[in-house]
C-alpha cells in the first residue's frame, strides 16, 4: 500500500510540474513560515510594539499509516506529529495570545490534540508556551516562563516545518523548556542569548541542577539565517553518586529564495559515564538533517528530507532493546518526500512518504509481529491558521 501511494504521489507531482512550467510564479515569501518556529528571539521584527494583544489560532488534522505495529498506547514509535496508526486525528488545536510593547512582552499558547498527548510534558500538558519578558535596557530583554525550543530547524507545529513528520533528531532534542532567557538583540542580523532552564526537555526540575545554555543567531543577508545553540546540564538522579554531565550543541542554517528553501542542521552531544560497555567512559552522539523545498507555483511545492541519527550508547534515546532483548543504541537513516498544496497562504495540504532504517542488529520495529529494522510511513495532513 505504501509503495503504491508513494508512486501515485510522485507521478501526480511530476505531471503537474511539467504542465505548469510556463506559469509565472507569484511569490508569497512574506507568508512562508517554514523553519521560523525555533528563533532564539521570536519577537524580532514580527510584531508591532504598540501594546496591542494579538490573538491567533491554528488547527492541523492528519491521517497516518505506518508499517510498524503500534505500541500498547496506540502510538507509533517516536510519536510526535501524526502519532496514531491507520487513524484520522487532530495533531494540534491551539489558541495563542501575544503582547508586545516597548517595555513588556508576553506569549501564551494553549493546545490540545494527539501531538501533546503523545510527546509533550505530562505537567501542565495543555500549555505549549507561556512566558513574559521586560526590557532591561535598550536591546536587552529578560524573559521567563515556559518556552518552545530554540534548538534545530523543526518545531512542534507542522506549519513551521516542511514535512508533517518530525525528524528523529527533533524527537530527541529538547523541544519544551522552562526557565529564563537573557537576549541581546544587537541588530536585525545578530542576536545573542544566555539561558537557564530547569532541565533538558522538561518543564519540572528533575534534580537540583540547572541546565545552562548559550545561543547565537546571525543573518548575513535576507536570504540566509544561521543559529548556534548549546546546553550544559546534568540529568542524573538527585541522589546518584555518578554525575553524567551532558553537553549538547546544535548548528543550523536556512536559505530562502522565491522558489527554493534549504535547511541544514547538525547536532553533537557528549555525556560523562555513559558508555554501555564501559560506564566510566564518555559517550557521544551526532545527528544531522538536510531538507529542501522547491516552489513550483505560489500554491504547489515539492519537498525532500534526509536524516541521520547516531546514539550508540543511548545518551538521549534511553533504553532500547532489539529482537534479542539486548540494549542497543540507535543508528538510523531516513528519507522523506512529498508535495504541498497551499489553497491560501495561511494553509496547507500535504502528502508525504518516509522511510526509516536502523542497523541490521537493531530490530526496533515490528511488522506483522515480526522484528524489523525498517519502517515505511505515509502521512496526509491539512492545516489552517488565522
Image (tube, rainbow, N blue to C red):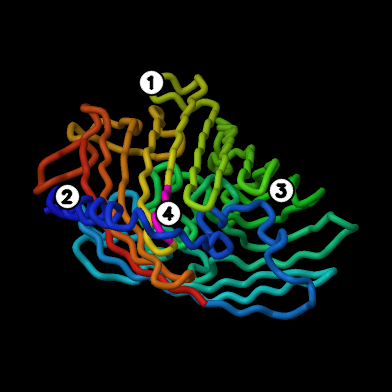
Q: Could you tell me how far apart the alpha carbons at marks 4 and 3 are, in whole angstroms? A: 37 Å
Q: Is residue 295 magenta?
A: yes
Q: Earlier in the sequence, mark 1 or mark 3?
A: 3
Q: Earlier in the sequence, mark 1 or mark 2?
A: 2
Q: Could you tell me how far apart the alpha carbons at marks 2 and 3 are, in whole angstroms? A: 46 Å
**For the residues bearing labels 2 and 3, Cβ distance under 8 angstroms:** no
Q: Nearer the viewer, residue 344 or 40?
A: 344
| Disc sitting over residue 277 in the figure | 1
Q: Name the spot of residue 146 as percent of width and height, x first.
A: 62, 62
Say if 179 sits above or below 286 in the image.
below
Q: Name the spot of residue 52 as percent of width and height, x first.
A: 74, 80
Discs 2/3, front? 2
User: Residue sitting at 43 percent across and 43 percent down?
Assistant: 291
Range shown magenta: 293-297
Q: Nearer the viewer, residue 382 or 19?
A: 19
Q: In the rendered image, which residue does mark 4 sit on?
A: 295
Discs 4/3, front? 4
Q: Earlier in the sequence, mark 4 or mark 3?
A: 3
Q: In the rendered image, which residue does mark 3 sit on?
A: 195
Q: Could you tell me how far apart the alpha carbons at marks 4 and 1 are, in whole angstroms? A: 48 Å
Q: Where's the N terminus, which quadrant?
A: bottom left
Say if 334 sits above or below 260 in the image.
above
* Residue 267 visible in the snapshot: yes
**For the residues bearing labels 1 and 2, Cβ distance under 8 angstroms:** no
SS category of the residue bearing label 3: strand
| Disc sitting over residue 7 in the figure | 2
Q: Could you tell me how far apart the alpha carbons at marks 1 and 2 are, in whole angstroms? A: 44 Å
**For the residues bearing labels 2 and 4, Cβ distance under 8 angstroms:** no
* Residue placed furthest toward the front: 22
SS category of the residue bearing label 1: loop
Amino acid at each position: 500500500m505504501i509503495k503504491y501511494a508513494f508512486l501515485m504521489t510522485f507521478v501526480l507531482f511530476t505531471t503537474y510540474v511539467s504542465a505548469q512550467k510556463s506559469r509565472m510564479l507569484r511569490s508569497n515569501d512574506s507568508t512562508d513560515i517554514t523553519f521560523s518556529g525555533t528563533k532564539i528571539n521570536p519577537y524580532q521584527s514580527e510584531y508591532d510594539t504598540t501594546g496591542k494583544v494579538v490573538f491567533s489560532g491554528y488547527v492541523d488534522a492528519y491521517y497516518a499509516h505506518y508499517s510498524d505495529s503500534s505500541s500498547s498506547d496506540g502510538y507509533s514509535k517516536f510519536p510526535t506529529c501524526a502519532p496514531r496508526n491507520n487513524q484520522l486525528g487532530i495533531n494540534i488545536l491551539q489558541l495563542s495570545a501575544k503582547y508586545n510593547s516597548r517595555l513588556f512582552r508576553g506569549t501564551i499558547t494553549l493546545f490540545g490534540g494527539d501531538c501533546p498527548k503523545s510527546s509533550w510534558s505530562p505537567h501542565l500538558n495543555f500549555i505549549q508556551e507561556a512566558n513574559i519578558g521586560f526590557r532591561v535596557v535598550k536591546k536587552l530583554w529578560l524573559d521567563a516562563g515556559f518556552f518552545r525550543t530554540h534548538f534545530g530547524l523543526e518545531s512542534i507545529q507542522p506549519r513551521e516545518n516542511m514535512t508533517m513528520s518530525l525528524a528523529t533528531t527533533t524527537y530527541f532534542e529538547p523541544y519544551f523548556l522552562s526557565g529564563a532567557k537573557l537576549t541581546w538583540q544587537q541588530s536585525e542580523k545578530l542576536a545573542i542569548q544566555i539561558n537557564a532552564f530547569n532541565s533538558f526537555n522538561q518543564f519540572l526540575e528533575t534534580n537540583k541542577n540547572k541546565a545552562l545554555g548559550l545561543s547565537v543567531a546571525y543573518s548575513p543577508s535576507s536570504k540566509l539565517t544561521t543559529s548556534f545553540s548549546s546546553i550544559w546540564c546534568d540529568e542524573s538522579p538527585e541522589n546518584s553518586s555518578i554525575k553524567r554531565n551532558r553537553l549538547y550543541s546544535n548548528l543550523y542554517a536556512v536559505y530562502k529564495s522565491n522558489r527554493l528553501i534549504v535547511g541544514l542542521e547538525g547536532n553533537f552531544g557528549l555525556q560523562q559515564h555513559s558508555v554501555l560497555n564501559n560506564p566510566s567512559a564518555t559517550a557521544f552522539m551526532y545527528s544531522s538533517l538536510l531538507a529542501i523545498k522547491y516552489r513550483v507555483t505560489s500554491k504547489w511545492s515539492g519537498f525532500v528530507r534526509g536524516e541521520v541519527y547516531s546514539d550508540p550508547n543511548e545518551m538521549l534515546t534511553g533504553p532500547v532493546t532489539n529482537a534479542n532483548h539486548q540494549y542497543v543504541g540507535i543508528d538510523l537513516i531516513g528519507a522523506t518526500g512529498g508535495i504541498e498544496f497551499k489553497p491560501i497562504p495561511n494553509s496547507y495540504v500535504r502528502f508525504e512518504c518516509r522511510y526509516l532504517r536502523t542497523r541490521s542488529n537493531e530490530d526496533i520495529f515490528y511488522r506483522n509481529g515480526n522484528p524489523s529494522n525498517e519502517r515505511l510511513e505515509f502521512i496526509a495532513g491539512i492545516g489552517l491558521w488565522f
